[in-house]
Image: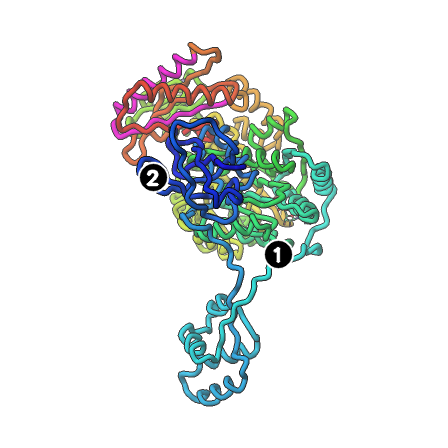
Amino acid sequence: MISYAGIIMEFATVSDIDRPFTYSIPDKLKETLKIGQRVKVPFGKGNRLKIGYVVSLLESIEPQKYRLKEIKEVVDEEPLLNEEQLEIIHFIVEYYGTSYASAIDVVLPPGLKDEPIAKNPSTIKMVCLNQDMLKVKIYYEANRHKQSFEKQRWIIDYLREHAKEELKAFERLEEVSKSSLKTLIQKQIVEVIEEEMIHQKDVIKYETFKVLNEGQQAAVDYLKALSEADVYRPVLLQGVTGSGKTEVFLHAIKEILEKGGSALVLVPEIALTSQTLSRFKERFGNQVALTHSRMTPKERQRLYMQAKDGEVSIIIGPRSAIFMPLPNLKLIVIDEAHDSSYKSEVEPKYHAIEVAKARMKYNKGQVLLATATPSIETYYEMKEGRYDLLRLDTRVGEAKLPEVEIVDMRLELANGNNSVLSQKLYMEIEETLKQDKQIMLLINRRGHSTFINCRSCGYVLKCEHCDVSMTYHSSTRSLQCHYCGKTLGVPEVCPECGSKHIRFFGSGTEKVEAFINERFGEYGVGRMDTDTTTGKEGHRKILEAFRRKEMHILIGTQMIAKGHDFPEVTLVGILSADSSLYMQDFRSNERTYQLLTQAMGRAGRGEDKGKVIIQTYNPDHLVMDVVRHNKQEFFYEQELMNRQMMSYPPYSNIFSVLIMGIDEGEVIRVTHLLSQYFRYYSEKGQNHFRVIGPSSAVVSKIGDEYRWRLFILGEVRDKLLIYGRFCLNKFYTHEIVNGIKIQWDINPLAMV
Ligand code: ADP
Ligand code: ZN
Ligand code: ZN
């Protein structure tokens, strides 16, 4: 007989109550209580009723010192969490060292109250005319000559023609006056009736699927074979931009649906455009649902329940959609899989790819990572045989990869041109406008760091001990290395060639826009960056205006590089390819490579061949050479070698600690003290870890809070995680710190 339940409290983010508590089950619930259900239980000294989740059911327990408390009531009739979700919650707790409460929180939709979750209504309200036609007719005749009847007349005429209409949709019609409708309902001329909602799934529209080319077909066949074998497998779909990757996973999803399975598709939030959605809608109709950041908590809860009840088969969404509880989930597609938005920066700091793998392991399905530029980690997993590889090497149809030209900006300067555009790019813009084609200009302004750059010789000031550039800190007016802590004053002249043309690098989108507007304003110039796109609408509007060719030139940050398909764009200019190269991060080569490749992917997607012009002060840099000659494999091999030499990921794991506080001195003191703990337990223990720091964070102060950093590198992830948390616990036990926040993460994507 089941008599006891293990219960995790919903609010228990504090570690000492972050464990299951045993409660006894009252007789009335003994037969019906299920794992995954929400319950109300008395908690703590005051026995206030709190919400908890049933995570285990037990027949007997060890003898207890105290009398067990009883579960008071259940909240939802059906369990909110199923077995798979409980597995995933365990996985998150273990893998990210987070609390049960925050793992449960991320798996469930937001905004749950202590009442049953919002469900989709089972009935729907419809409006129609009163069946008594005579009554309607008399009313109509009596009023038809009155001027004020106009709006009512419209409603009656409409309903005569359309028989009945969903109330909500009807109210939204522009011609419908709500007050007139109300009057008609009061006079019983119009009736509101409730009808049973029949959920009928649309059928797949086969005629909308493109005939695949050979490469695409091979990829789809491979995925089909995996799915038939019913085995878990991650697959990397590496294809150049425009090679038809989306078409491949649309077909793969079709195969899954035909067998009664379901699929999740993750896309970066920024790529969640109507264009993406309509490609799915036209094929799968109402079997597809979308999640996005603008949904209200209620809408999310409804979608969650719809997914759980199997009313939809495909969900598209950003990172958080990874937790959608689709039954019989057999495929998770992660589009633009290299995108850093898939890693959460707030508790629990999960990576969607890792969660996807855990889910598919459980469901014996496939994870498909689609990208033109895999992350180094993904490439490494593939090389090691843990991911399968599918490649698409050519663009679909006639579209060719664009021609790439590198412009040496040092020469421009030597020739007296110190504007943001090189001679070459200027001429190409003129030429492109003459042909009535469109242009994208990309300003690579990633990260907050600035570096010192000599405009005469291209020299970038680097740390003498590390292969990274020194970062300018405006607060102290000095240069710092974030890896070894070395500090320098700002030089007056270039240490390499003595030129005075040394400056902090970086030119903003606004400056460029002004410049372009002055010269090409008549062709229409748009700008897209975080400043112009507050609110998702702004973002969409600019892109749509560009699509309609209301403007010929679009200027933007990396935002414009992602995924958009504008067939009329034949020229892409990258104004400052360098600024992410010298970011304070071992991933800067990788990021620059990805960004340039993605940006190049915007050119020449239509019939006309595209052209890409990359302006740089470092034409000889490895990354420039790689993109010009399309030496992708060479790049990955080089980059892996560098990482191995420096023992950075994927050859190690990083435990990063961020120490924050208003009092700078205290922040520094705590950081040093903490680093001693890490060093002490590394030396004392069997496993050795490399402690880097203390150093101030790249963004050394945010909102009056100073930020300092420690990084600890270790070979084995699990061991590093255990050690890192152990050291932090020891520190908290022995030290008293006031007004200091300490956050940590394992394998963060950014080292800022
Ligand atoms: P990717 O996702 O690799 O960038 P897409 O799937 O978006 O590529 O394909 C690029 C363009 O080619 C799209 O407009 C798409 O509709 C078209 N396309 C893809 N596959 C085919 C095909 N087999 N036949 C015809 N057109 C295709
Ligand atoms: Zn110089
Ligand atoms: Zn250094």
Position above or below: 686 against 144: above
Q: Which mark is residue 587?
A: none
Q: Residue at x 53, y 17 (%)?
A: 645
Mark nearer the N terminus (2 vs 1): 2
Q: Is residue 689 magenta?
A: no
**Residue bearing the label numbered 2:** 47
Image spot of residue 416 (x, y percent): 42, 35
Q: Nearer the viewer, residue 215 or 131?
A: 131
Q: Which residues are magenta?
A: 653-682
Give residue 522's quadrant in the image.
bottom left
Q: Amino acid at mark 1?
A: Gly
Amino acid type at circle 2 is: Asn
Instruction: Answer with left or right where residue 307 lies relative to residue 680.
Output: right
Q: Are marks 2 and 1 in contact (CB under 8 Å)?
A: no
Residue highlighted by disc 1 = 285
Is residue 284 visible from the viewing direction of this image?
yes
| Whole-percent x, y for residue 385 in the image | 65, 26
